[in-house]
Every structure is written in C-alpha cells, then in structure tokens.
Image: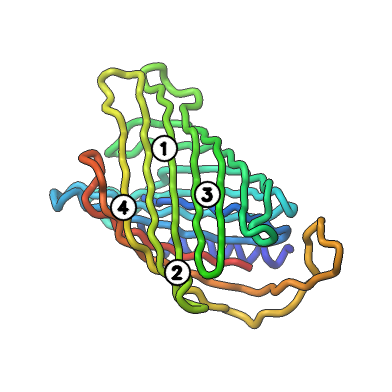
Amino acid sequence: MINKLKIAASVALLLIWTLPANALSLEEAGVEKGEVEIQYEATYTDDNGEGAYEHEEEIEAQLGITNWLLLTVGIGFEEEEGERNFELSELEAEVQIELIDPEKNGFGLALFGGISREFSTEDDEKDEKEFAIGVIAEQSFDKWLVRGNLYYIGDLKNEEDEQFDGVQYAYQVRYQMTNSFGFGVEGYGTHKDFEDEDEENLNEHMVGPVFYYSTELEPRHEKASFKNNDDDDEDEEEGMELEAQFGVLFGTNDDTADVTFKWGLELDF
C-alpha cells in the first residue's frame, strides 16, 4: 500500500506540472479495496473564435479504503488568457459509497458527496465554496457500458448575493471495439440558479463522441479477491493499466460554447 501511495503521489505531481487543460468529470460506480487511481481530465474551449477561451487542468487521486468506500482529492489550475502560465483555481475532496457492485451484478449503484473551493482569479473575482450530493449508476452488458452521474450542487458559506443551487449531470454510452480501443458518446450539463438578480443563470449542455485507448503497463498477476461477500477464494487480476481518451463535445444551447475539446489520462493500479 505504501508503494502504491508513493507512485500515486509521483504521477500526480508529474501530471500537474506537465499537462495543461475545464475538466469534465464522469465517476464510476465500482470500488475496490486497495486500488489507487490517478485521473487527469481536461478541456479546451474557444468561444466561437472570439479570443475568450477556457483552459484548465484537473488532477484527482482516488483510493479504495474498503470494498465500498472510496476517497478522492483533487486540485485544479487555470491558465490566464493570453499567457502560458497557470494559477491555482480549485481544491476538492469527495467520498463515494458503493451500494451495488457492478462487477458482480452488471448493474452498479453508488452515493456521492463532495466539497470544493474555487479560488478567485484575474478573470473571475469570486471566491466560492460548493458542495455536491448525488448518485452514480451504470449498467454493462456484453461490450456495452452505460453510465450516468446526477448531483445536486449548492453554495457553502458564500456571500448572500452569490447564493445558488442547481443540478449537474454526466452520462456515457460506450462500446468496447477491441481489448484496447473503445468508442462512445458522452454528455455533460450544469444548471445553476443564482439569487442575485444581476447574475445570469449558468445553463450549459454539451454532447459528443469520445475515443478510448487502454494498455497494460506491467504484466498482470493473480491476487486473492478482497470482496467481502465472496464465498469462494476466487482470484482477480491485478496490475497497472493506463487509459487515454479524446473527445469533441458540441454545445446544444446558446449558453454553451459551440465546440469543446476533451482529453484525459487514467492510471489504475
């Protein structure tokens, strides 16, 4: 476990300093004790070529504490427009509780809760604290996977005129073409209602194709299963796997940029 944590910390620091990118997050329902996962998710949005773009990076480190409890910490950076440097924009902490194991049932269900602190930047003077609670569900069959996230989001001790609440969602329909290559459609959306009459509603929705490529970085070997409800001493495969993804998302309403590029890396071990 100690070695895994050292590797996770090293990879996270490397990604933070080497990879630029507004992150769109899609959480999985499954939890495995002792598993460490490093996620890098990023987007680049150019607002219709008018020079107003969003360019951020986000790194998350996840650790399976038990077979049903997952803890996540994340950090985000934002690039100042017109410059090739980044400043700290967000810190977040999340917890996930698995209710139904997707590996055993094909269907998976989990509860999600998280808090985040968004720091003010030169382009945005607001310093916000947010929370989110919701559910994660997924269903797999043959080579297909359908996954969805739905959260309620709200303010946490912000100034009175900046109070908001709303919903956030993400979904994925994926087909695994080969052991390494997959193709899918992903969609993301957020709608926030502000109490301040001078603040416009944030109502962004986007959807588009995403390609996936996965590979094993070390030979797989067998280990005893950690699942509590296993009657037999079944074996599971353990190793290190890297998945890369790239997608193009298209805005579906006037409040959303026409095109958003999404890419990311995920390391499991």
- Residue 230 against residue 45 in the figure, above or below: below
In the rendered structure, are the residues bearing label 1 and label 3 in contact, judged by CB atoms less than 8 Å apart? no
- Estimate the x, y position of residue 95 in percent, counting from the top left: 62, 43
Q: Residue at x 45, y 23 (%)?
A: 158
The C terminus, quarter of image? bottom right
- The outermost residue toward the bottom is 219
Q: Which mark is residue 74?
A: 3
Separation (CA) of disc 1 from disc 2: 29 Å
Q: Residue at x 86, y 67 (%)?
A: 232
Q: Residue at x 62, y 52 (%)?
A: 108
In this view of the protein, can residue 16 be seen by the observer?
no
Q: Nearer the viewer, residue 67 or 145?
A: 145
Q: Nearer the viewer, mark 1 or mark 2?
A: 2
Separation (CA) of disc 3 from disc 4: 17 Å
Sequence-earlier tag: 2 or 4: 4
- Estimate the x, y position of residue 107 in percent, counting from the top left: 61, 54
Residue occupied by mark 1: 119
Sequence-earlier tag: 3 or 4: 4
Q: Nearer the viewer, residue 228 or 117?
A: 228
Direction from residue 72 to residue 144 in the image, left or right: left
Separation (CA) of disc 2 from disc 4: 19 Å
Sequence-earlier tag: 1 or 2: 1
Residue occupied by mark 2: 244
| Amino acid at pointer 3 | Gly
- Residue 168 against residue 107 in the figure, above or below: above
Separation (CA) of disc 1 from disc 4: 15 Å
Q: Which mark is residue 55?
A: 4
* Label 2: element kind: strand
* Label 1: element kind: loop
